[in-house]
Image (cartoon, grey):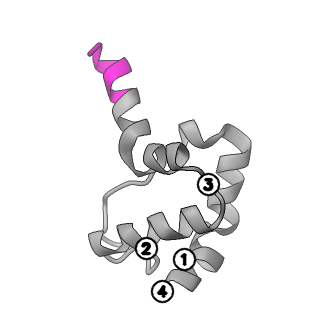
């Protein structure tokens, strides 16, 4: 599964977004219903983390992608 995440899921769409808008604007959704086969459920998150780190994304970028970017935007929008 990790190999398919590296090759199939992270390329090209994800990497394109990272290059186009930067890692501070990229995030994962948590809707696992009808989301395809790359992320079947929450157990894939650890494999996604491993795949991102293996692709050379730094810890700060990975933490943002996995949820901190969403929290930052939510705080900005909600004024908190």
Q: Where residue 48 sits: x, y (%)?
A: 46, 68
Could you tell me how far apart the alpha carbons at marks 3 and 1 are, in whole angstroms? 14 Å
User: Most extreme residue toward the top, as rendered?
Assistant: 79
Residue 57 is marked as 3
Residue at left offset 38%, top offset 69%:
46
Could you tell me how far apart the alpha carbons at marks 2 and 3 are, in whole angstroms? 14 Å
Q: Which residue is mark 2?
A: 47
Q: Residues within 10 Å of mark 4 (few under 14, many from 20)?
A: few
Residue at left offset 73%, top offset 43%:
20
Along the polypeptide, which appears first: circle 3 or circle 1?
1
Where residue 77 sits, quadrant-wise, is top left
Could you tell me how far apart the alpha carbons at marks 3 and 4 are, in whole angstroms? 19 Å
Residues drawn in magenta: 73-80
Q: Main secondary structure of the magenta part?
A: helix
Q: Which residue is mark 1?
A: 5
Answer whether labels 4 and 2 touch (C-beta < 8 Å).
Answer: yes
Q: Residues within 10 Å of mark 2 (few under 14, many from 20)?
A: some
Q: Which residue is mark 4?
A: 1
Q: At numbered mark 3, what does the secondary structure look like: helix, strand or loop?
A: loop
Residue at left offset 33%, top offset 28%:
74
């Amino acid at each position: 599964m990790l190999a398919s995440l590296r090759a199939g899921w992270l390329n090209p769409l994800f990497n394109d977004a990272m290059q186009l808008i930067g890692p501070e604007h990229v995030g994962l959704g948590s809707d696992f219903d009808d989301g395809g086969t790359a992320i079947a459920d929450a157990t894939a998150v650890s494999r996604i983390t491993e795949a991102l780190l293996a692709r050379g994304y730094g810890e700060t970028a990975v933490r943002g992608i996995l949820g901190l970017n969403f929290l930052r935007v939510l705080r900005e929008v909600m004024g908190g």
